[in-house]
Each structure stands twice: as C-alpha cells, then as structure tokens.
C-alpha cells in the first residue's frame, strides 16, 4: 500500500458527507419536479385515508360511549358521550340525561358494548356518515336468572345486536356524533 492510498478517518467522513449531500440533492430535485405528492402522507389519497380513519375512530368511540351503561357510574359515562357529541344530538341527549340515569339506576343496568365494524359511507364538507355494527351484553334485574345460551353465552345477561347509521360533524376538537339512527 502506498502512503497516498491510505484512507484516513477524515477522508471517510468526507465521502459519507458527499454521498448524503448527493442524496439530499436528488430528493430536492424529485420533489421539485413531482411536487409534494411524492412525500409520504401528502397525496390526496393519503389525506383522504387519514380523514376516513379519523371519522371511523370517532364513530367507534362515540357509539361505544352511547351504548355503555353502568348504573353505578353514570355521570362519567354520560360526560364522555357529551364530549364526543355535537349539535342537536348533544342537545337531545343532554335533555334526556336525568331520565336515562334514573332508568339505569332503577333497573340496575350494566351494558357493555363491543363495536364490531365501522363502515364510512361519505365524508364531504365537514360532514360524514358511517354505519356501525355493535353488540351489547346487558345485565339488569330482569336478566339476573337468565341462563347462557348459544346465541348469548353470558349467564345473567341478554345479548343485543345493533346496526346504526351515524352522522358526524367535524369540529375544532375533531369529529363528533351529530345524529344516531338505528338501522331496521
């Protein structure tokens, strides 16, 4: 090996920096020519997917809150639903809260939902529509002596299966429930 052909640490650093600079220049040229669409997460499809995911997440959280009942802790459950709601739906629920709480406490209801599927149908202009499939295991005074069955494997409970059309509105705090209708 000749003394001039030795690779020094400084020379290695210079080679690595030159390679990184070349890669950065290529990236700048590609973005300049193709626009922002080549950057991850910035294409119209990526933005649309994120919006659909946000709507689906809000629909799932909202319906979980809507269907959750525990006669021992209704206040936090109801506050959670109100926080996930807006518009006329929020006003209607707020007006019915006292009666809902009294009925749950009187019958000693505990209802545990499982949101199975959320299908987002439409998202446009700050409004969205989704279909939500949810199952509910409900225990109360009337179900206390129920035996488990094939269709409801929970002793002392009844199983209910729901499908809802959910409307959501985009707010400064994210997507919120603005209407809930059962699908018949």
Image (cartoon, rainbow, N blue to C red):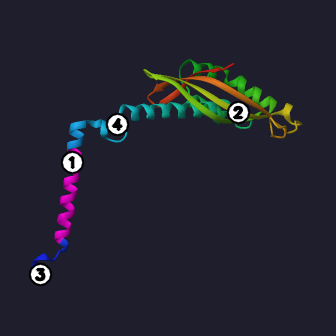
SS assignment at label 4: loop
Badge 1 local density, few (<14 within 10 Å), some, or many (20+)? few
Of mark 3 and mark 2, the one earlier in the sequence is 3
Please tell me the numbered disc located at residue 42. Answer: 4
Q: What is the span of residues highlighted in magenta in the rendered image?
A: 10-28
The numbered dot on residue 2 is: 3
Residue 23 location, x and y as percent? 23, 52
At x 19%, y 55%, the residue is: 21
Q: Dividing the picture into quarters, in which one does residue 38 lie?
A: top left
Q: In terms of secondary structure, where does tag 1 sit? A: helix
The quadrant in which residue 19 appears is bottom left
Quote the CA–CA distance across marks 4 and 2.
36 Å
Q: Secondary structure at mark 3?
A: loop
State the residue in front, 176 or 119: 119
Residue drawn at 72 percent across, 33 percent down: 136
Q: Is residue 154 above or below residue 88?
A: below
């Amino acid at each position: 090996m000749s003394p001039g052909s030795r690779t020094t640490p400084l020379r290695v650093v210079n080679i690595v920096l030159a390679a990184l600079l070349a890669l950065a220049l290529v990236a700048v040229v590609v973005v300049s020519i193709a626009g922002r669409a080549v950057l991850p997460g910035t294409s119209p499809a990526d933005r649309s997917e994120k919006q659909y995911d946000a709507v689906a997440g809000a629909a799932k959280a909202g319906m979980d809150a809507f269907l959750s009942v525990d006669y021992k802790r209704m206040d936090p459950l109801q506050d959670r639903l109100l926080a996930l709601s807006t518009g006329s739906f929020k006003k209607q629920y707020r007006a019915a809260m006292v009666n809902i709480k009294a009925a749950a406490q009187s019958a000693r209801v505990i209802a545990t939902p499982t949101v199975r599927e959320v299908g987002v149908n439409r998202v446009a202009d700050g409004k969205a529509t989704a279909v939500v499939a949810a199952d509910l295991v409900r225990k109360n005074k009337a179900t206390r002596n129920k035996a488990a069955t094939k269709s409801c494997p929970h002793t002392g409970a009844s199983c209910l299966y729901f499908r809802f059309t959910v409307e959501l509105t985009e707010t400064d705090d994210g997507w919120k429930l603005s209407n809930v209708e059962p699908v018949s």
